[in-house]
Amino acid sequence: MISLPIGRIRGLLIITGVVGIGALIAPTAAATIRQAVSLSLDHGLLNPSFLLMLVPFAVWSYGLRILRWHTLVRRLVPGSSLVTNGYTQIVGFAFSATPGRIAELYKLKLLEHSTRLPIAQSLPAAIVERLTDVAAFSLLAVIGGLFDWSESTGAGSATRWILLLLGLAILASVYHLGWRHRGRFEPPPTLAPLYQRVAKRARALPGISRLSTILSQLKTGGSQVGSPSIMAFALACVVIGRLGDGVILWQIARAVGYPVSFSMALLMIGSAGLVGGITFSPGGLGATEATLVGLIMAHGAPLGAAMVTALGARTLIYWLWVLVGLCVFVVGQSKHIAGWDVPRSQDRAYVEE
């Protein structure tokens, strides 16, 4: 009788699941891509070499998001390598093509395996990621909308710079308030004795010890990644990276023959990202593309050109990196099954305060 280690069975099951999901998605994705390519070739709208010229902007955006995750993990595990953190981010991003991006949290399990960092302690880093994504999309939509409004009304460049400086002043004020109130929670003096008695009795209840450990890990992780400077840096990585996404959409729209301004491209990227996140569809599938198509059509492009623009941009911005992540995951799991482990941190230690 042949027996396999549990680790190998788990790896085989995961790979089988990924292949199964790919088999379910592939027909629809292939039909959509075929339609877009057909429209492109029939009308001479896009050239494959032109799309390759835009890949560096997609790498810029994706790379800065990897840097954001690496920075957050380094706060939790000082000395952890870029290889380890990048591996977990690349694989996790591939699994974001699930409802609500819930499977993306698998990267926390990979991180625990590589560094022994408890999942509860690394969860705040994933929360910071989502919060900064929402904030970045909102900022892009607002900035793009304000700049496009000033251009359409002929307000001039002075108005645009005034609006930009006002936005920076607001962000600086928020940062200052966050810095001032960065202290830990303390109960009011009049309630302190009651708080201590309740906490003492609660610790004696069954199962509370495990829950108390998890809450302590969450609190520790939150304090490590929740500082205003780290939050600001994480947000800056996303916003600056998403400017590359705006360039991709802007240039593809120009190549298709129905150009939009760069500020409008930022507005579209921000709005589509927010809609895709609200719908909780796998990777924003359908909702994000439909939003982009609708916004592009609202600026005078026909359906075919709008579809080519939206799908071309989404392919470079999102789906390309999902495919890359799945390939990295399959290769990593295959090597793991053969006895090769995923990249590990050198110190394999985590910090608890």
Image (cartoon, rainbow, N blue to C red):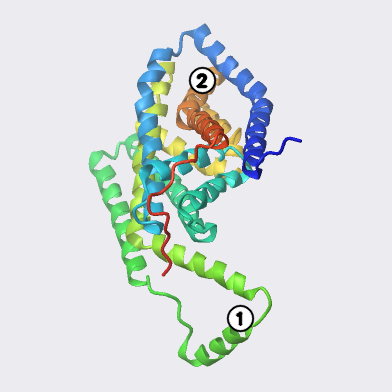
**Res. 23 image quadrant:** top right
Of residues 117 and 228, the one nearer the viewer is 117
- The answer to whether one can see residue 113 in this image is yes
Q: Is residue 146 visible?
A: no
Q: Position of residue 68 (x, y in %)?
A: 38, 47
Q: Which callout, 1 or 2, points to the residue nearer the camera?
A: 1
Q: Is residue 289 above or below residue 89?
A: above
For residue 353, above or below residue 254: below
Marks 1/2: CA–CA distance: 59 Å
> Which secondary structure, mark 2?
helix
Task: Check if mark 1's residue and mark 2's residue have beta carbons within 8 Å.
Answer: no
Residue at the limit of the structure toward the right, as seen here: 1
- Residue 260 in percent (x, y) is at 40, 27
Going by the numbered disc 1, the residue's amino acid type is Arg
Q: Position of residue 225 (x, y in %)?
A: 40, 59
Quadrant, the N terminus = top right
Kindly identify the residue that appears in the image at 41 percent across and 53 percent down: 73
Q: Nearer the viewer, residue 75 or 124?
A: 75
Residue projecting furthest to the left: 158
**Residue behind mark 2:** 308
Quadrant in which the C terminus is drawn: bottom left
Residue shown at the point (54%, 88%) measured from the top left: 196
Q: How many marks?
A: 2
Q: Which residue is mark 1?
A: 203
Q: Residue at x 54, y 14 (%)?
A: 37
Q: Relative to 255, is 225 above or below?
A: below
Tag 1's secondary structure? helix
In primary-sequence order, the first of circles 1 and 2 is 1
Q: Amino acid at mark 2?
A: Val
